[in-house]
């Protein structure tokens, strides 16, 4: 048996409010716990997006008392939502700044209505976001170049979500060597599935960014080994089976669930000698806490049997969507027990206690805002 600190996932779409047919705070945080995650951060692209303090407060009150792991929130970027960033800079009162972990800027098309493409609006967003808080981007390929330039011009702490291409790894490596405060994450679907799998998976292999080819995938693994990649996130983005299989002519939503498969896949990679346990801890806990100012959870661990072989099976998952693109994959390494603040919350495939999670807020940032 090996013991890991509770994993932290900074990129989760819990879907409540507005799309609870896909997932809700209860099912999503049960899935998190069953996957070894004791802390997750929720993305803002709901049908009613998290772009006002009121929408954020609504999420917080919906989540309280119902969550099985700790949950924090990100804020969404629109021209309108920049009016609230001032509040995010205010250190005196309990403001937006104290409640949210980062700002998410959608620079390419994906689920939701938060796409920002206008250069002037993007400049306003980057310029007005507090420089000591993380600005996350969904920026694929050439769009990432624009994001890095904007962050460079405006002095932002840029975090690149779901890196999936060799050219993105190269850009980030270069920006890091130029001394820019830039970090990035990869997901397990980009590390373990390729465009070949996408052909077989059909709608269930469709997500943004899409699955990479073998060469791009290898660049992601290399980025992990050489330290370019800072974190691993699930980008848990559930959609129902029906939504993934619309009547002819209907549009297929992008996104796949990932909370319950990420750790088993990483443990399998450990077993195969592709990554060390120490590196997994760095990518899913230590680095994450530093980048996002996530408070430490004491007496919080995941116990895994690193040698247990089993087959991933959607019927065993807690996610409401009820499927996984990793169906029937053979993995090595099973989550046996999860302890949150000294209390057992998961044991031998079962969630064993009423919800014990808290809504969490970032640790105070030490330096002065500009
Ligand atoms: O595939 C995706 N699904 N990519 C995203 O960026 C958003 C996500 C979702 O919310 O469904
Ligand atoms: Zn994204
Ligand atoms: Zn996402």
Image: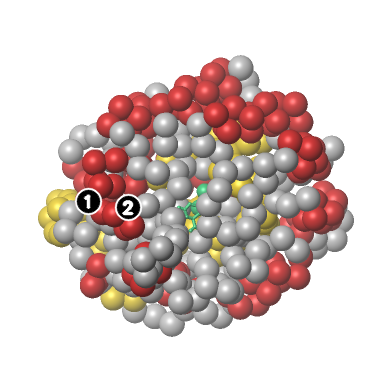
Label 2 crowd (10 A; few <14 / some 14-19 / many >=20) = many
Q: Position of residue 166 (x, y in %)?
A: 41, 26
Q: Position of residue 28 (x, y in %)?
A: 44, 69
Q: Which part of the image, by quadrant, shows the C terminus?
A: top right
Establish if 241 lies above or below 129: below
Q: Nearer the viewer, residue 107 or 34?
A: 107
Q: Secondary structure at mark 2?
A: helix
Q: Position of residue 176 (x, y in %)?
A: 56, 23
**Residue that appears at 32% across and 58% down:** 204
The disc placed on residue 200 is 1
Instruction: Kindly report the distance in space between the C-alpha atoms of the residues bearing marks 2 and 1.
Output: 8 Å
Is the CB–ligand 1 distance for label 2 below 8 Å? no
Say which residue label 2 marks. Answer: 205
**Residue that appears at 24% across and 41% down:** 196
The disc placed on residue 253 is none
Establish if 324 lies above or below 169: below
Circles 2 and 1: CB atoms closer than 8 Å: yes
């Amino acid at each position: 048996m090996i013991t890991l600190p509770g994993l932290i996932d900074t990129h989760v779409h819990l879907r409540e409010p507005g799309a609870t047919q896909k997932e809700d705070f209860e099912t999503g945080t049960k899935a998190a716990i069953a996957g070894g995650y004791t802390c997750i951060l929720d993305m803002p692209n709901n049908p009613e997006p998290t772009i006002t303090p009121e929408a954020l407060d609504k999420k917080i009150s919906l989540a309280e008392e119902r969550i099985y792991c700790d949950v924090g929130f990100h804020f969404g970027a629109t021209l309108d939502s920049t009016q609230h960033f001032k509040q995010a800079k205010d250190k005196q009162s309990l403001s937006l700044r104290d409640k949210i972990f980062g700002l998410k800027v959608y620079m390419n098309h994906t689920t939701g209505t938060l796409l920002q493409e206008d250069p002037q609006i993007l400049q306003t967003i980057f310029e007005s976001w507090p420089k000591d808080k993380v600005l996350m981007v969904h920026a694929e390929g050439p769009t990432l170049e624009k994001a890095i330039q904007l962050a460079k011009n405006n002095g932002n702490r840029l975090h690149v979500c779901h890196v999936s291409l060799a050219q993105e790894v190269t850009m980030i490596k270069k920006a890091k060597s130029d001394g820019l405060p830039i970090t990035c994450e990869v997901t397990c679907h980009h590390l373990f599935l390729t465009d070949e799998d996408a052909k077989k998976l059909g709608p269930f292999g469709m997500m943004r960014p899409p699955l990479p080819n073998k060469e791009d995938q290898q660049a992601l693994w290399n980025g992990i080994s050489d330290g370019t990649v800072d974190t691993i996130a699930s980008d848990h983005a559930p959609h129902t089976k029906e939504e993934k299989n619309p009547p002819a002519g209907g549009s297929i939503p992008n996104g796949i669930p990932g909370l319950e498969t990420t750790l088993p896949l990483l443990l399998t990679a450990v077993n195969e000698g592709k990554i060390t346990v120490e590196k997994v801890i760095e990518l899913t806990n230590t680095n994450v806490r530093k980048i996002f100012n996530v408070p430490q959870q004491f007496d919080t661990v995941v116990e895994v049997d690193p040698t247990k072989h089993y087959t991933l099976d959607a019927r065993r998952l807690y996610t409401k969507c009820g499927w996984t693109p990793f169906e029937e994959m053979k993995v090595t390494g099973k989550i046996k027990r999860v302890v949150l603040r000294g209390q057992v919350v998961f044991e031998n495939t079962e969630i064993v206690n009423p919800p014990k999670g808290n809504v969490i807020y970032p640790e105070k940032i030490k330096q002065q805002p500009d």
